[in-house]
Image (cartoon, coloured by chain):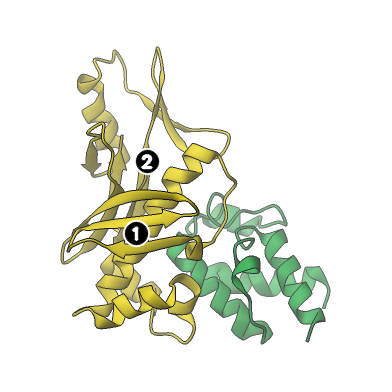
Amino acid sequence: MTSEAIQERLKTIVKPYINNQENFEKLSKESDFINDLEINSANLVDIVLDVEDEFDIRIENDDMEKMTKVEATVEVIQKKLSQK
Amino acid sequence: MIGNDIVDLNKANQDSNIFRPRYLEKVCSPEEIELVFSSSNAITTFWRIWTMKESVYKAFQRKFQFKTVFNPFAFVCQFEDSDSGKVSFKAHQLFTKTIQTEEFIYSEVINSRAKQRFFGSASDFLQKLKPELNLQSHPELTKTREGLPVLNLPNKTLAISKTHHGNFQAFQY
């Protein structure tokens, strides 16, 4: 799957948790879940689990800790998909 | 060191299902999961652990200036009594105090220099600070390069820890 396609699906996953609509609409690789999208940190767990369900992968702690930005999250997903 | 975190229990119950498969395992050690399930209220005990980890994370992030990471596992919680707790991060330890009501759970890092806390909106907080700090005008909340909240005063920068979730906001300074 291309990183663009993953990013599109990730955008749908994070949508219910965002608190900054304007930054969500212009979501890019550089977007930061907490600082830009103003997602509450409690919901980062939900995002990790939603990503696991959506892509049918399992994410360990070492990878989870990188998942605070769009680009790093897409990279983790891509890596996990390639290992399937 | 300062660091605080608040969880609006109504909002948390709407947004997050902590009993969802794998949820607790993403955040808690086996020992912490044991604390959750051996308590009289698993949900509030979980959010107590969560706010303890978050408040200590914020304190260490400010001290060590690390980039945002999401590693709740690195912060290991122990309960001392119903409101005091201890959180270990690598070789470091900090003590926390937790305040629980029907509506929210709030934890903060205990600071020896008798730091203050304020529950309420940012504008009310700044309003309160103006006379307290003898300021001519309203102080302005800004962020450091790392994204940590500070107050720029005429002669110094005052570190502020702020937390906002649902209907509740709190500041430690």
Quickly name the residue at label 2: B161
Q: Residues within 10 Å of mark 1 (few under 14, many from 20)?
A: many
Q: Chain of mark 1?
A: B
Tell me if A2 is positioned left or right of B165 in this view. Answer: right
Place of residue A10 in the rendered image (x, y in percent of width and height, measured from the top left)? 65, 71
Q: Chain of mark 2?
A: B
Q: Name the residue furthest front.
A: B91
Which tint is chain A? green
Residue visible at 33% across and 65% down in the picture:
B49
SS label for mark 2 = strand
Question: In front here: A81 or A13?
Answer: A81
Residue B119 picture quarter: top left
Mark on residue B71?
A: none
Question: In front here: B85 or B136?
Answer: B85
- Hey, what amino acid is under mark 2? Ser
Residue visible at 43% across and 31% down in the picture:
B150
Place of residue B46 in the rendered image (x, y in percent of width and height, measured from the top left)? 32, 72
- Hey, what amino acid is under mark 1? Thr
Between disc 2 and disc 1, whose residue precedes? 1
Give the vertical position of B139 relative to B83 (above or below).
above
Place of residue B155 in the rendered image (x, y in percent of width and height, measured from the top left)? 40, 12
Q: Which chain is yellow?
A: B
Residue visible at 55% across and 56% down in the picture:
A37
Question: In front here: B76 or A82?
Answer: B76
SS label for mark 1 = helix
Quickly name the residue at label 1: B51
Tell me if B10 is positioned left or right of B149 in this view. Answer: left
Place of residue B13 in the rendered image (x, y in percent of width and height, measured from the top left)? 32, 75
How far apart in space, not on screen, are marks 2 and 1 (Cα)?
A: 13 Å
Give the vertical position of B152 relative to A50 (above or below).
above
